Amino acid sequence: MRCNKRIVLIVMGILISNVAIGQSNQFQIGVHLGPFIPQNTQVQGLSQVSYVDGSPVSAFSVGFGNGFDLSLNGAYYFSDLGVQVRSGIRILQNELRMSLAPDGDIDSYENTLTVFPNTISFVNRFSPAGSRVIPYMGIGFGIYFTEWEEKHFPENATRTWMKGSAMPVGIHFLTGFSCPLYGDLFFTGNLEYSFASTDMKVKNADNNDEREIRDLNIGGMTISLGLAFSL
């Protein structure tokens, strides 16, 4: 307990001293957009089509593939130390639609994973001498509201429609940079790895059959670019 109290006091002292130094205190708000690459094989999934004599006879698709990440970010910096908060949406979508031999029936897969990350990060900026680029790195945690949906609609056959949701708590590590463009407008870049593991139950929308997916990591790698405005 004494050790924990000392750490808290040291951190508070650093923050207070930076605030006291600082005419560089500033608030920033910005937006980021970029690709997201999941790390879990069940989330990444795969699609496969089988051919006979050059014609597709069967199709199969699971998982969601890569996606994109769009986020709104706010940050407050006490000199070089800062706190970032983020709210966004992450969509991974895998669609497969084919006409299969010999009857020409349509086989359709529509798989969508939607994640709403809400996170807080503690970051440290660096100020290299003579450089306009300001790099930073940090660590944080958050809640990842997740919706899982898999649709398989084969023509002239029984459909399968699986749905599930979860709210895992995860951690993330990030690094990035900002570079002034004009006045208080900045160009920003961000690289983030997130890990958010959960056990998710997905249910058939038609007959309520249920299956559980254990130790599902819905995190992964995000590479994004954006703009920020300093207030």
Image (spheres, grey):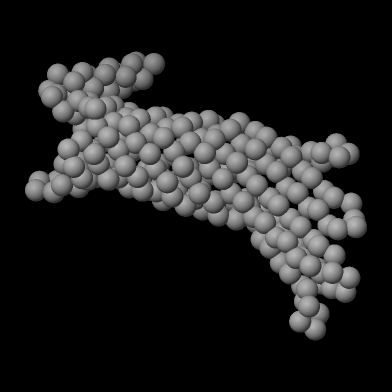
Which residue sits at x=70%, y=60%? 96
Which residue sits at x=78%, y=52%? 152
Which quadrant of the figure contains the N terminus? top left
Q: Is residue 69 above or below residue 184?
A: below
Q: Position of residue 20 (x, y in %)?
A: 14, 19
Which quadrant of the figure contains the C terminus? top left
Residue sticking out furthest to the bottom: 53
Instruction: Name the side, left or right, on which 26 lies relative to 142.
Output: left
Observer able to see residue 121: no
Q: Position of residue 204 (x, y in %)?
A: 82, 41
Observer able to see residue 28: yes
Which image quadrant is residue 120 in?
top left
Which image quadrant is residue 127 in?
top left
Which residue sits at x=23%, y=22%? 15
Which residue sits at x=79%, y=67%? 99
Closest to the observer, 186 or 217: 186
Instruction: Name the side, left or right, on which 138 lies relative to 183.
Output: right
Residue sticking out furthest to the left: 130
Q: Position of residue 42 (x, y in %)?
A: 65, 52
Q: Position of residue 126 (x, y in %)?
A: 20, 41
Q: How many marks?
A: 0
